[in-house]
Amino acid sequence: MKKTDNQMLVIFGASGDLTARKLIPALFNLYVAKQLPENFIVLGASRSDMSDEEFRNRVVYDSPYLKSKIEDLKENYLKGFTNMFFYEDLGSDYTAEYSGLAKRIEALNASKGTDSNYIFYFSTPPSLYEPIAKNLAEVGLNNQELGWKRLIVEKPFGYSLETAKNLNKGLQQYFKESQIYRIDHYLGKETVQNLLVTRFSNSIFEPLWNRNYIHHVEITNAESVGVEKRGGYYDKSGALRDMFQNHLMQIVSLVVMEPPIGNEPEEIRNEKVKALKSLRIMRDEQTLFGNTIRAQYVASEINGESVKGYREEDGVNSDSTTETYAAIKFYVDNWRWHGVPFYVRTAKRMPTKVTEVIIHFKTPHHQIFSDSGLNSKDNKLIIRIQPDEGILMKFGVKVPGQGFKVERANLDFYYSSLAETYVMEAYERLLLDAMQGDATLYARADEVEAAWEFVDPILDYWKNGKDVRMYGYAAGVWGPENADELIEDFGYWRNPGENLADDPGYCVIC
Ligand SMILES: NC(=O)C1=CN([C@@H]2O[C@H](COP(=O)(O)OP(=O)(O)OC[C@H]3O[C@@H](n4cnc5c(N)ncnc54)[C@H](OP(=O)(O)O)[C@@H]3O)[C@@H](O)[C@H]2O)C=CC1
Ligand SMILES: O=C1O[C@H](COP(=O)(O)O)[C@@H](O)[C@H](O)[C@H]1O
């Protein structure tokens, strides 16, 4: 087990939603699992006026996100957790100088024994990331002489390639790249990490993982919810920035990458960057027109209840052109993937919440059972990221009886069969990794920029292109019909059900 040094976690934006909904519950789970170091405290920092006690009440006792968890625990046990929390009011804004904050950190460090090791978690609006880093540096809180200093930076990391580069440069003026941890919570998901293990710890997949055997790759990320209470944020972002540039590009990089020479953070991250750099960037309008689809959900009924259209959501412009659905077809220009199309889509207000990667294998070169009536492209490996996490392989079997009738059968593995094993939540895993100085599951500057490099021309085309279309789809269906044209040459999107084995249309033995 890796060692976790004594340390202090300083959260900027501690009065916000992310802190309450993700960070504190993750810390609570780590505390219960005895994963936190002996001397560990959390200092919340925001503009809101709160005492330590009020902060503790807010993030622990009154937290709707901890309610079910703390009911099971004895009061005195909970006290240990609550006592770790402190709060510093930053005054009217985050850009004023931080000498008060530095003094508080110093005093807490001395009394709580955190060995001058600090993580600064940026959970504020992104416009404040660089000013906060600058202020920290000005009071010496980037100095690693006495103890290490790390930044965890929340998404979105930039709004475009240019802004991402500026943000990287801005942060790197004050902190070294090795101190910066850019969080992408999809990398904290056990099933996303399992992509690496599936590929590189088995000898049966890797020999087939290339253009000789793979026909096309399909990745679906669907959410059943709409924009919820985040309409204001989402309307400036859209599906491509909110999900595709970060989470889906990370998944793509893990599917596409070459085998790393080892599992050290830089060994893995180097290969991911190479993978992202090999994506063929679409530059001309004709290519962009034929390979990208965007759409917005419109008002509809789901299970008998009426659901608002995107443009009617709170915080969204009534004539918004922000996409809630994005589907992209692209190619990867390298030896392994030459000529293999990738189809990736992400959307809100789909029939179900699901994320999965489907590797579609090629038809056998010489088919001797071609009268079976099956689509010969039915050899698939489905890696289910969420929910009903698992892996399913589809292959042909003989139907008992006369002749050689072939039907599809499933070979499957479900995470639920590991019910005895505790599976960490994404934020829990990522926080613990940063505490231990392991950046493997965090995005490096060049990785983020390579992803923007691919996405930027699409965004630009959607904003300024001549023939760009914005399609509509009824809330609760699998997107606009036009998205089917994108994948038509090869079949159709797998519109999965809630369960991994739900197989619309063509699974005979499931
Ligand atoms: N919530 C989520 O699920 C996710 C959030 N994120 C990212 O995490 C970061 C924080 O998100 P979230 O907690 O949801 O945001 P909130 O708006 O809930 O919280 C942001 C915090 O920043 C502080 N703040 C400082 N200056 C401003 C300002 N000018 N406007 C608004 N707030 C300000 C606020 O505290 P105070 O007023 O006390 O200073 C507030 O508590 C964002 O970058 C977001 O993109 C990423 C993934 C998911
Ligand atoms: O980062 C984000 O992710 C969530 C989806 O996360 P998941 O773990 O529930 O799949 C998405 O709803 C949100 O819009 C986006 O900002």
Image (tube, rainbow, N blue to C red):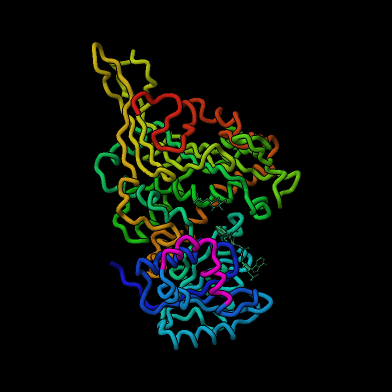
Q: Is residue 417 left or right of residue 496?
A: left
Question: For residue 427, which quarter of the picture?
Answer: bottom left
**In the rendering, at what x and y percent does residue 500 appear?**
40, 37
- Is 56 part of what is drawn in magenta? yes
The answer to whether residue 262 is above or below residue 60 is above
The residue nearer to you, when weighing 64 against 17, is: 64
Magenta residue span: 54-73
Residue at left offset 45%, top offset 76% = 79
The residue nearer to you, when weighing 189 against 274, is: 189
Is residue 285 visible to the viewer in this orientation of the structure? Answer: no
- Is 61 part of what is drawn in magenta? yes
Q: Main secondary structure of the magenta part?
A: helix
Q: Is residue 351 left or right of residue 77?
A: right
User: Which corner quadrant holds the N terminus?
Assistant: bottom left
**In the rendering, at what x and y percent does residue 319 appear?**
75, 43
Is residue 441 visible to the viewer in this orientation of the structure? Answer: yes
User: Which corner quadrant holds the C terminus?
Assistant: top left
Residue at left offset 58%, top offset 43% = 348
The residue nearer to you, when weighing 393 against 412, is: 412
Ligand number 1: quarter of image: bottom right
Residue at left offset 49%, top offset 66% = 24
The answer to whether residue 443 is above or below residue 349 is below
**In the rendering, at what x and y percent does residue 105 appear?**
51, 83
Residue at left offset 47%, top offset 56% = 185
The answer to whether residue 437 is above or below residue 318 is below
